[in-house]
């Protein structure tokens, strides 16, 4: 990212990190320390990161110290909770790791959660289980709440309840000028707007409060079909989606899962398709709406039924372990019959596709309804999200990525334009700009100049300003 007003970076080896370290309650690690590698390694092992130093922040004051130190030494600042959304190699950056900011309190009187920036959805789900409360988590419980929510947060119940960022009440955030601020719709309306969708471009969230839903049980899970049925299931799914009420959220995934621990035996080593489904309502109604998909082919596994909402991670069963991966993503306006056939040509069972998974998530439902308090989240009106993941040895990943890009290019006639910030990670430098409309991007850039005058967050997602 260009940064015209940023001073020339100092040479990293001339920086005395001891001066910062002495002011921290947490710990600073430089390259060579074993904990440095642990903290700096992202979920996608194909991205080799090389921050100048990593600070395991113990509190918000540590984050303030880091941001001020970085500004004084012309270092970029980056933030990591779980590493699920690594977007650059963090070269020469001061990386703030938030895993120690792990306080998580759920309040069943106000139906809210108060969390530190290092908390993952798994913790919120586990605590909510006893109270019958759930937040609008994503498909993978291992993802960090702050990173996910700051990117909008489009989860497996998105058609029923919208984006997670619409449920935020407040953020505690350290802006690029080193100020710790409490941002609400009233107290810091512009910052509050930008933190809900703009990712880490304006500040580092240290804590946040958001609303929970009273929803102890959902009718949810996945149907799995074998290779011979993949094409037909995808065709039927595409016709079925427009008939669904907003109480149902669904996605479909063509998968080639290797035989390995954690992969159910019937799915291992073959080309399958999964229809994921979350219905908010009675089990009878959920089953009635799902019936056309249950009869779409011979089922390998039927794992849909009533379940505690805290088990929602089972719907996608995303991989938990780190791996080298090439991800690509785009948004579709529509997914008609011709689009289905085009996708099958590129990624169907007869395509020799190298993708581990090609997933289409139906959007719509209540997502396009704008929240009372506007936010920076864009592209709410898109019809579907298309996302691919290939896994393999790093030297092979560029070819797998190129295959995905060609697939996305073939889908151009049905493109919505752009992608969602949370899914744009693998799309390459500059792709985050496509997550925003020009006017939202311009406003984010203006706010970034105000809240981050030294441009310490120049590795973040808001492009050149
Ligand atoms: C398996 C998998 C499943 C996913 N499923 C979904 C899904 O269903 N829906 C969805 O919307 N997204 C999904 N994502 C994307 C995910 O939400 C983003 O990658 C998110 O940024 C991850 O946040 P993290 O903190 O876990 O990751 P990190 O890599 O630690 O952080 C990624 C980015 O988040 C921002 N960020 C993190 N912490 C802070 C902070 N304290 N303050 C400010 N910014 C911060 C920064 O921009 C940072 O670079 C998924 C990703 C994976 C790998």
Image (cartoon, rainbow, N blue to C red):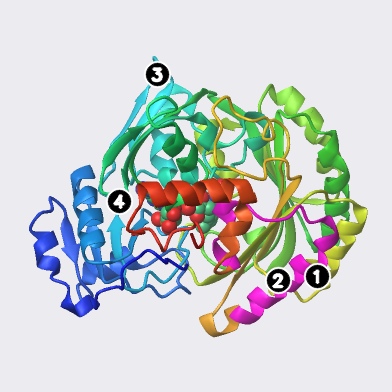
Query: What label does residue 346 carry, if any?
Result: 1
Q: Which of 200 and 4 is in front in this view?
A: 4
In the image, is residue 33 above or below residue 231? below
Say if mark 4 contacts mark 3, CB within 8 Å. Answer: no
Q: Residue under label 3, please give it.
A: 108
* Element marked by disc 2: helix
- Camera-near label (1 vs 4) is 4
Left or right of 269 in this view: 324: left
Vertical side of 97 occupied by 34: above or below: below
Q: Which of marks 2 and 3 is nearer the N terminus?
A: 3
Q: Earlier in the sequence, mark 1 or mark 4?
A: 4
- Work out how far the residue at label 2 is from the one at label 1, CA to CA, in angstroms: 11 Å
Disc 2/disc 3 C-alpha distance (Å): 46 Å
For disc 4, the marked residue is 98
Q: Marks 1 and 4, Cα distance to the nearest angstrom?
A: 40 Å
Give the residue pinned by disc 2. Answer: 405
Circle 3: element type: loop
N-terminal of the two: label 2 or label 1?
1
Q: Which segment is the magenta one? A: 398-427
Horizontal side, residue 334 vs residue 109: left or right = right
Q: Quadrant of residue 113?
A: top left
């Amino acid at each position: 990212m260009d940064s015209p007003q940023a001073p020339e970076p100092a040479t990293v080896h001339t920086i005395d990190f001891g001066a910062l370290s002495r002011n921290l309650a947490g710990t600073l690690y430089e390259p060579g320390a074993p904990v440095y590698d642990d903290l700096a390694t992202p979920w996608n092992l194909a991205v080799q990161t090389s921050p100048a130093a990593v600070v395991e922040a113990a509190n918000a004051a540590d984050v303030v110290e880091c941001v001020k130190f970085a500004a004084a030494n012309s270092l970029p600042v980056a933030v990591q909770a779980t590493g699920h959304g690594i977007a650059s190699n963090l070269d020469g950056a001061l990386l703030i790791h938030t895993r120690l900011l792990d306080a998580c309190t759920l309040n069943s009187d106000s139906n809210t959660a108060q969390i530190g920036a290092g908390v993952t959805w798994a913790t919120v789900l586990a605590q909510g289980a006893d109270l019958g409360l759930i937040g609008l988590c994503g498909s993978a419980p291992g993802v960090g709440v702050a990173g996910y929510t700051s990117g909008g947060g489009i989860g497996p119940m998105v058609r029923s309840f919208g984006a997670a960022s619409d449920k935020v009440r407040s953020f505690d955030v350290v802006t690029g000028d080193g100020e710790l601020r409490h941002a609400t719709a009233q107290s810091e309306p512009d910052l509050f707007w930008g933190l809900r969708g703009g990712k880490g471009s304006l500040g580092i969230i240290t804590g946040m409060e958001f609303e929970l839903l009273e929803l102890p049980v959902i009718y949810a899970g996945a149907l799995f079909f074998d290779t011979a049925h993949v094409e037909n299931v995808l065709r039927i799914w595409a016709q079925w989606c427009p008939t669904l009420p907003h109480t149902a959220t669904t996605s479909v995934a063509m998968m080639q899962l290797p035989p390995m621990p954690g992969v159910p035996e019937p799915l291992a080593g073959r080309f399958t398709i999964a229809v994921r489904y979350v219905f908010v309502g009675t089990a009878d109604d959920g089953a009635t709406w799902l019936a056309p998909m249950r009869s779409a082919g011979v089922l390998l596994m039927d794992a849909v039924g009533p379940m505690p909402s805290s088990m929602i991670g089972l719907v996608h069963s995303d991989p938990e372990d780190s791996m080298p991966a090439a991800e690509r993503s785009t948004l579709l306006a529509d997914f008609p019959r011709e689009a289905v056939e085009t996708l099958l040509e590129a990624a169907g069972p007869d395509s020799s596709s190298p993708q581990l998974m090609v997933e289409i998530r139906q959007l719509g439902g209540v997502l396009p309804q704008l929240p009372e308090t506007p936010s920076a989240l864009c592209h709410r009106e898109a019809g579907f999200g298309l996302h691919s993941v290939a896994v393999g040895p790093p030297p092979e990943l560029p070819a797998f990525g190129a295959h995905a890009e060609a697939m996305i290019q073939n889908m151009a006639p049905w493109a919505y334009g752009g992608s969602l910030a949370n899914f744009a990670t693998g799309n390459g430098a500059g792709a985050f700009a496509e997550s925003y409309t020009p006017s939202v991007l311009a406003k984010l850039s203006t706010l970034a100049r105000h809240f981050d005058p030294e441009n310490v967050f120049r590795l973040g997602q808001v492009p050149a300003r």
